[in-house]
Image (cartoon, helix red, strand yellow):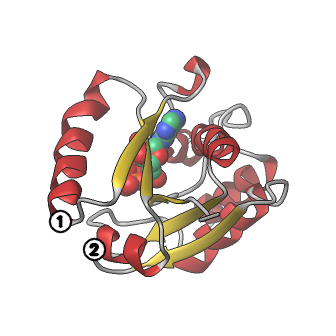
Amino acid sequence: MKKIIAVYPGTFDPITYGHIDIIERASVIFDEVIVTIALNSSKKPLFTEEERKAMVLKAMKKFKNVRVDSFNGLLVNYAKDVNASVIIRGLRAISDFEFEFQMSLTNRKLAPDVSTLFLMPNEKYTYLNSTLVKELAAFEGKIDCFVPEFVVKKLKEKFKK
Ligand code: ADP
């Protein structure tokens, strides 16, 4: 039987419990989930590709059917290259909707056989994003309820410099 592969793209700067929640849900649905770090995003990441990848890898250790990768260029081309038929995105609130809707319809136009699937995290993560975590970390705010311990440590190191 054909393996159903899903890609979960993002900046993951850094990975949070919100991302992990979505990955956990996707890993139950699909044969394989590829968490893939977008390298040509317009965002200016705090962490390098290697740092982000290392944190995602650590967070994914317990998932047997999840692998970690990165990509440049168009997401739909990447999805085709890795034989993925699904793109996973997280939906937290209505504020995510407009941009995500536009992106998913554009991707569908470019690649009609790749579908976007939106998953909602546990409600306790609906207001969480990586930017908020970085802002808190910069001012030594408490972040251990938002990111794993090893991410707390990496953020502390970054802001000490
Ligand atoms: P991007 O630059 O692609 O938005 P992010 O790392 O910010 O990269 O987010 C990747 C995906 O994870 C997006 O679909 C985003 O909506 C989702 N996401 C981010 N934070 C959360 C969260 N707290 N709960 C659920 N989904 C989230």
Query: Image point 62% across, 35% down: which residue?
Result: 141
Q: Position of residue 68 (x, y in %)?
A: 63, 70
Does dot 2 land on a helix, a strand or a loop? loop
The answer to which of 89 and 53 lies nearer the viewer is 89
Q: Amino acid at mark 2?
A: Leu
Q: Quadrant of residue 17?
A: top right
Q: Residue furthest top?
A: 123
Q: Which mark is on residue 25?
A: none
- CB of mark 2 within 8 Å of CB of mark 1? yes
Residue located beneath label 1 in the image: 110
Q: Give the left or right position of residue 146, taking residue 41 as reference.
A: right
Asked if residue 52 can be seen in this view, the reply is yes
Q: Position of residue 45 (x, y in %)?
A: 42, 65
Q: Amino acid at mark 1?
A: Leu
Of labels 2 and 1, earlier in sequence is 2
Query: Image point 78% across, 56% down: which residue?
Result: 150
Does dot 1 land on a helix, a strand or a loop? helix
Q: Residue furthest front?
A: 1
Q: Position of residue 146 (x, y in %)?
A: 65, 36
Q: Residue furthest right?
A: 62
Q: Which mark is on residue 74?
A: 2
Q: Quadrant of residue 19?
A: top right
